Image: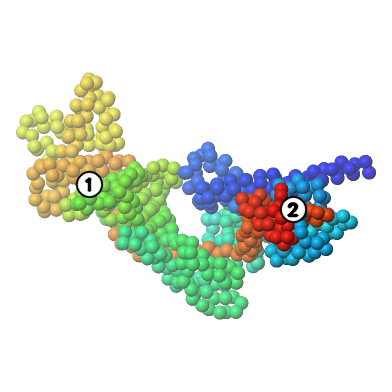
Amino acid sequence: MQHSAPRASFLDDLVELLSSMRFAISLLTILAIASLIGTVVQQEQPANAYLQQFGQFWDPIFSRLGLYAVYSSSWFIAILAFLVLSTTLCIIRQFTPMVREIRGFREHAREASLRHFAHRASFEPTLPPEERSGAATAYLARTGFRFRVNDHADSTLIAAKKGSLGRIGYFLAHGSIVLICLGGLLDSNLLLSVQIHLYGKVPAPGELTIGEIPPSARLEPSRWSFRGNIYIPEGTTASQAVINADNGVLLQPLPFKIELKRFHVDHYENGAPKRYASDVVITDNESGEVFERTLEVNKPFEHRGITLYQSGFDNDGSMLNFTAHGMTSCAHAAFPLEGKVGRRIPLFDKQSERIKIPPPCNQVLENYLAGYSLEFTDFRPINVENVGAPDSEGNHPGASFLGSGARPASNEKLRNLGPFYTYILRDPAGQAREFNNYMNPIQIDGLQYLLSGVRTSRMENVSWLRIPLDDEGSADTWFAIQQSFFDPARQAALIKRFISHSTDKDEKKTLEAAAKLLLTQFAQGGMKAVESSISEMKIPEDKREEANIFFVQVLQKLVWDAWMMVREAAGKGKLEPDDAYAPFVRDTFIALDSSIRYGAPFYLQLTNYEQRQATILQATRSPGKSLVYLGSLLLSLGVFAMLFIRERRLFVLFKKDEALVAMSSDRKTIDLDETFARHRDGLAAALGASAPQD
């Protein structure tokens, strides 16, 4: 018994804390901050996206704090639960006093208290004492007051009021918070977690296919809340939603089947998507009813308590046809190659004979490519980027920023750059390089290029190989020049042509030695290797820049001669050196230097494709949605009641030769003075009194 008092005191203090306004405001402040974070930080994105955005230091910290899934995090749900508890205790504590205040008239107010009211007045009525109370109550009833009369031996007090129902706004507002938070709890991952623990479900790895997911990761049909995605390729049917949970996935069966008949996208003139929609056929499992619907963004469809949203779309194994241009020492091999988005293929398998490489390079490339594999990860037939507005000649200066990942600072315009494809090349050691290629040429400063971006990690910026096109819009000229530079069998012919421009024997020997050295060094490491060889030579410091310029000039002359050899082999006429051809020679040389670091034995040039698409729908069951809607309605009513329904209490005290009028209000407003004056004068007139006196 000695411990009961302290224990009761502790419980009272705990209830006092939980039901205090400061505690509730603190919780609301934390919720506001969390909601702000959830708005600023994109939720439920791939892990690589967060790692790239926040870096290796902050990414694990933010992940542990649950900032990537704020609204389903345990601490956010706990705050909602405490807010429900706190607000409920507030309502319980205030219920009895508030109801007493609504029902009470304060007919026992003391005269001394009334004379201290800020709004009061007294006057001498002319009506007989027996008629005063009736005249006052008639006026009060006429002006909308409810009242009670309390007679004493020497006085009569009339206590009147109106607007007391405005206090109900308190219960409506606080009750709405409880309903909204309960709706949030019902629609959170709390019930899903309970279901997982009750049924012993274990999330499966996300990389598994639907058929590979074990029964332990398949939920039972229920009316509990969930939010999952449905991936449906054209012409196929799905009946389960994939739910992300604890770094894995769970399968939630649906009470109906969804067949995607067609997915279509409408575009603006610049190629930007304007509308995308899914034509689906829904078959109810219970009734067998079949009906068709078109799902669009912001136009959801609800059936059996489950709402379907058009969330996005994806590639579903589009077939791609390539010409693979060799970029090895046996570079003149070009062979066809087929790929499917989402699939991984070995580059050379003697049993399947996937790649047909023509002789004489077949053995060389087959040995080189053994162990390599390709993964086609993405394909977009329409690729809209902000590359700036074209000038009078049709050039898009913004396209020059593609290599740096920047965007023009002004005059920004969207432009469709055509088909875009991404693939990953893995070497025998498992190291990967990602390639981002455009099918169509990109025009920059009046010249056209094939662009191929490469990076070894998503954390890196993309480095671009820009292959210049010749005057016929073909990249074959560049590949032929590249063969002459890097194919030892063709280097001899290139060097012979290069030294033929000189008639002096000694000069020919010097040029021949320089050309052999430069081609060897350049093939090993590009201009970096050439510059390193200059630093190793015993050339005075003040002459190294001059030597570097000389070597670059030699290499560019070799590019010119290689170009002329290509034209002659194609039966085209020889060109005379001219400044008009300088940009092509310069860009060819730069692309040759970039190709050294390209890191692939070939360049895949897309020649044809067959697009196959899939829709991504979001399926949600939100049993708490109705509570949220009801809570929002009650909140609006409660705020309206508290702001616009004002309680007014009016007291009329009759004594022998005096009538005392006093008024109070739950809130001081600018119209209270006018209201009091109006009722004061009205009562004075009803009682036949002279001018009131304060």
Tag count in the figure?
2
* Residue 104 vs residue 654, the one in the foreground: 654
Q: Residue at x 51, y 48 (%)?
A: 40
Residue 364 seen in this snapshot = no
Mark 1 Cα-neighbour bin, 10 Å: few <14, some 14–19, many ≥20: some
Q: Would you say 357 lies left or right of 287 here? A: left
Which residue is pictured at 40% across the width and 64% down the height?
Answer: 275
What residue is at 41 percent from the left and 59 percent from the top? 341
Q: Quadrant of the N terminus?
A: top right
Label 2 and label 1: CA atoms lie apart by: 94 Å
542 sits left or right of 692 in the view? left
Closer to us: 2 or 281:
2
Q: Would you name the residue on which mark 2 appears?
A: 123
Relative to 522, say whether 260 is above or below: below
Residue 577 is situated, as x and y percent measured from the top left of the image, at: 10, 42
Task: Give the left or right position of residue 74, taking residue 298 as reference.
Answer: right
Disc number for residue 43: none
Residue 358 occupies quadrant = bottom left
Where residue 337 appears, as percent x and y from the top left, is 33, 58
Looking at the rendered structure, the kind of residue marked 2 is Phe
Residue beneath disc 1: 445
The kind of residue tagged 1 is Asp
